[in-house]
Amino acid sequence: MEEQLKLALAKKALQIRKYVIEEVYSAQSGHPGGSLSIADVVTYLYFHELRIDPSNPNWEDRDRFVLSKGHCVPAVYAALAMKGYFPTDWLPGFRHLDSPLQGHPNMLDVPGLDMSTGSLGQGVSAACGIALSAKLFGNSYRTYAILGDGELEEGEVWEAAMFAAHYKLDNLVAFVDFNGLQIDGHVEDVLSPLPIAGKFREFGWNVIEISAHDFDAIDAAYTLAKTVKGKPTIIVARSIKGKGVSFMENEAAWHGTAPNGEQREQALRELDEALLELEAGN
């Protein structure tokens, strides 16, 4: 990937992380840890990979995206606003009663969303249906999904895995945010889904393992996925929960906790400093 593109994506990812902090702080509710860990892949998808048109959100040939781990929607709301689907002024209304931006994605109220999600496991199942529809009707769009590693404890995920392989959904790419933590602690201690890559291989998927915070690796994975025929692709990406905010990183307590005023200021300061470092190194 060209250095200028990587720099532009890195800057957008930092802005998404800032918006995540602001959204969750404003609501005093939400899920910052997992929203921060997917910020890089969300940035890559919305600002490089997805074939979409904010001026025509219901364009029939657009690529589809499903956030299966729906509680981490603050990152997606930030990307949608930055992309121009709705004003950034909406973001501070996150989880407020009079706002369309609720704690889980609602496609009926928010332009740019392709599926309402929340109950874990259902989003990837919907993505399978969307991908199969494209196959049946000869549509060229591709379908993308993001799952959490804790979400893999849901049986419905594995029903979807069988379905996607059975119907040879090579137009489907799922991404596992493998940060190792869920609300109750380490995924290995709660109900281990490991080995994630090995399980999906046995279910008949093409498997790619990468770092979730390396744009070269993300780009290479999605580029490779487009060449695979006859099977769906899963990108298993090692990530850091709370990525970009020092006191949130690798802390399960920040799965669903809002920062207070002092913590908000520190988080935004750290992200601003990271942005300055990027600009200075350019």
Image: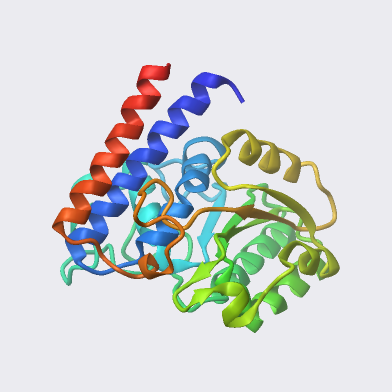
Front in this rendered view, residue 281 or 232: 281
Q: Is residue 16 above or below residue 230?
A: above
Q: Is residue 29 left or right of residue 240?
A: left
Residue 87 visible, this orientation: no
Q: Position of residue 42 (x, y in %)?
A: 48, 48
Front in this rendered view, residue 132 or 206: 206
Q: Is residue 190 left or right of residue 17?
A: right
- Residue 187 found in image quarter: bottom right
Q: Residue at x 39, y 32 (%)?
A: 11
Front in this rendered view, residue 136 or 168: 168
Q: Residue at x 23, y 47 (%)?
A: 266
Q: Residue at x 53, y 55 (%)?
A: 65
Residue 219 visible, this orientation: yes
Q: Residue at x 26, y 61 (%)?
A: 24
Q: Is residue 72 above or below residue 44?
A: below
Q: How is the image coloured?
A: rainbow
Q: Position of residue 237 (x, y in %)?
A: 63, 53
Tally the numbered discs.
0
Quadrant placement of the N terminus: top right
Quadrant placement of the C terminus: top left
Q: Position of residue 78 (x, y in %)?
A: 33, 49
Q: Position of residue 250 (x, y in %)?
A: 46, 59
Q: Is residue 49 above or below residue 71?
A: above
- Residue 132 found in image quarter: bottom right
Front in this rendered view, residue 182 or 162: 182
Q: Is residue 181 left or right of residue 56?
A: right
